[in-house]
């Protein structure tokens, strides 16, 4: 665990901000899994200028991790070193004009889809089935129900690790299946997405259908983190997990969902180590039965607690 002295020394090294800097800030309650240790320092910028000034002035050796609503994220029990930046409401604007939608990195994907529906813009309904924010969707080229961000992306605005603003094209992001080639120190600010003008009622009906299908097939009312593993080429991850006999598999208070085997669930008192260890056991069993190596789709950040076995840092 990080000592109080280490935390204090870091926060004292950071530039002044207009938003909030909090040392030792708990993160678990802000994640969908409801697990994990604290941020060494949590920064909530009040606006884009606040974020820009911070990145330009912070010491170069201080690591930065950006999170949104932490829907597809596992924070390890030992916490996250450096500064965790959470982009909240000031970065959540959504505006639709003609066939384009401006969406802030902190905007919920579902809110973007619903805003488009009200404005009569189709083609982005799949976002209602993607948990999380636009920033996270860009970082992993998120998708669902046959579409993904790269299919509708016109461009994006970012800040690099030195506080310089850039406007980038989809080609510059090197987007692939659950992959974005953007440098790790880029912070997404907003995206411009394109759609197709349609009858609002038709668009709303498609969103309602997606939401009904999610509710029927995914454990969305549980403490979960979305799809755990990316689909390997030529395979569906859930089928491989099921064929390996992992449906309902338990470790500590973590469990493989019986409704959808590509979801891990915190049954109430799981630790991040329980969840990650269960995922690694699933990967081991799938490889033994099929020869396929599953890759994590959930992003894992931070450090495990000392003495935890079976977790890969």
Image (cartoon, rainbow, N blue to C red):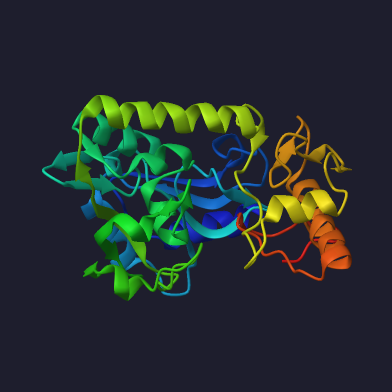
Residue at the image point whose x is 39% and y is 31% from the top? 207
* Image: 29 above or below 226: above
Q: Is residue 108 visible?
A: no
Q: Tell me: 221 left or right of 137.
A: right
* Image: 257 above or below 286: above
> Residue 173's x, y, as percent?
35, 71
Residue at the image point whose x is 74% and y is 44% from the top? 261
Q: Nearer the viewer, residue 244 or 282?
A: 244
Q: Nearer the viewer, residue 178 or 106?
A: 178
> Residue 211's x, y, as percent?
48, 29
Q: Tell me: 33 left or right of 270.
A: left
Q: Quadrant of residue 216?
A: top right
Q: Quadrant of the N terminus?
A: bottom right
Residue at the image point whose x is 46% and y is 33% from the top? 210
Q: Quadrant of residue 185?
A: bottom left
Q: Is residue 241 visible?
A: yes
* Image: 295 above or below 11: below
């Amino acid at each position: 665990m990080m000592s109080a002295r280490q935390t204090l020394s870091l926060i004292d090294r950071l530039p002044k901000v207009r938003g909030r800097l909090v040392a030792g800030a708990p993160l678990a309650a802000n994640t969908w899994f409801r697990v994990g240790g604290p941020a060494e320092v949590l920064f909530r910028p009040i606006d884009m200028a606040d974020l820009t000034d911070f990145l330009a002035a912070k010491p170069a050796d201080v690591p930065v991790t950006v999170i949104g609503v932490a829907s597809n994220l596992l924070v390890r029990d030992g916490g996250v070193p450096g500064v965790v930046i959470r982009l909240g409401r000031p970065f959540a604007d959504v505006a639709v004009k003609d066939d384009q939608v401006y969406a802030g990195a902190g905007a919920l994907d579902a809110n973007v889809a619903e805003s488009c529906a009200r404005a009569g813009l189709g083609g982005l309904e799949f976002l209602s089935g993607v948990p999380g924010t636009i920033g996270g969707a860009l970082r992993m080229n998120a998708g669902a129900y046959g579409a993904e961000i790269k299919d509708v992306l016109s461009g994006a605005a970012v800040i690099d690790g030195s506080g310089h603003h850039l406007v980038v094209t989809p080609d510059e992001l090197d987007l692939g299946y659950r992959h974005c080639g953007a440098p790790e120190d880029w912070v997404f600010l907003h995206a411009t997405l394109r759609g197709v003008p349609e009858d609002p009622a038709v668009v709303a009906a498609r969103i309602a259908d997606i939401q009904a299908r999610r509710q029927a097939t995914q454990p969305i009312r549980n403490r979960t983190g979305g799809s755990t593993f990316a689909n390997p080429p030529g395979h569906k991850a859930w089928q491989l997990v099921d064929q390996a006999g992992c449906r309902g598999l338990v470790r500590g208070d973590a469990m493989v969902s019986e409704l959808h085997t590509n979801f891990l669930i915190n049954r109430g008192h799981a630790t991040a180590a329980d969840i990650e260890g269960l995922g690694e056991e699933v990967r081991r069993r799938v490889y033994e039965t099929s020869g396929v190596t599953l890759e994590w789709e959930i992003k894992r950040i931070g450090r495990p607690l000392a003495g935890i076995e079976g977790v890969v840092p």
